[in-house]
């Protein structure tokens, strides 16, 4: 895992785990690596990983089964989709729309983006 200087490491670990759940690499009920194991694998302090896991537990993404470990919660994917969509529309999309306006981009310029959006229409 490559870390960015622009965001706290514990949040980057959370984002990576969220991506694993949303892409289906981690399914509800799956056991995730222990704090110690993940900390060693990505070469960070165990407290940093624990902070990520605690945040995800608070959000309802993970559940801690004492003495056994952390598991992806049953409703994790739907919870994450809701959180991520709200964040996308409130934080990510407005600057993109601004750039589209500033650069005077049209539908032809954004054809590949529109193709992705249209392919998602058939998935629902």
Image (spheres, rainbow, N blue to C red):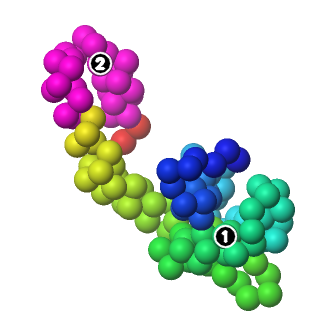
Q: For residue 67, what is the image quadrant?
A: bottom right
Residue 71 or residue 47, whichever sits in front: 47
Neighbours of disc 1 within 10 Å: few (<14), some (14-19), many (20+): some
Q: Is residue 65 left or right of residue 78?
A: right
Please determine whether, in this image, residue 1 is positioned above or below residue 103: below
Asked whether the beta carbons under mark 2 and mark 1 sit within 8 Å of each other, the answer is: no
Image position, residue 70 (x, y; %): 70, 75
Residue at the disc numbered 1: 48
Q: Residue at x 54, y 60 (%)?
A: 8
In terms of sequence position, does the residue under pointer 2 or pointer 1 come before the other? 1
Magenta highlight on residue 104: yes
Image position, residue 61 (x, y; %): 54, 70
Q: Residue at x 81, y 71 (%)?
A: 36
Q: For residue 101, what is the image quadrant?
A: top left
Please determine whether, in this image, residue 15 is positioned above or below residue 99: below
Residue at the disc numbered 2: 110
**How many numbered marks does the figure carry?**
2
Q: Residue at x 57, y 56 (%)?
A: 12
Q: For residue 38, what is the image quadrant?
A: bottom right
Q: Residue at x 28, y 13 (%)?
A: 109
Image position, residue 96 (x, y; %): 27, 35
Please determine whether, in this image, residue 115 is positioned above or below residue 25: above
Q: Is residue 78 left or right of residue 3?
A: left
Q: Residue furthest bottom?
A: 66
Which residues are the magenta region? 97-121
Mark closer to the observer (2, 1): 1
Q: Quadrant of the C terminus?
A: top left
């Amino acid at each position: 895992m490559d870390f960015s200087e622009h965001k706290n490491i514990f949040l980057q670990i959370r984002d990576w785990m969220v991506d694993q759940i949303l892409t289906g690499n981690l399914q509800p009920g799956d056991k995730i690596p222990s704090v110690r194991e993940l900390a060693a694998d990505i070469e960070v302090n165990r407290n940093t990983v624990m902070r990520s896991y605690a945040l995800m537990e608070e959000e309802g993404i993970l559940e801690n089964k004492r003495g056994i470990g952390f598991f992806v919660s049953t409703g994790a994917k739907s919870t994450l989709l809701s959180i991520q969509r709200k964040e996308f529309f409130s934080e990510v999309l407005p600057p993109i729309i601004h750039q589209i306006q500033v650069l005077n981009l049209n539908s032809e310029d954004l054809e590949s983006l529109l193709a992705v959006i249209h392919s998602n229409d058939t998935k629902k």
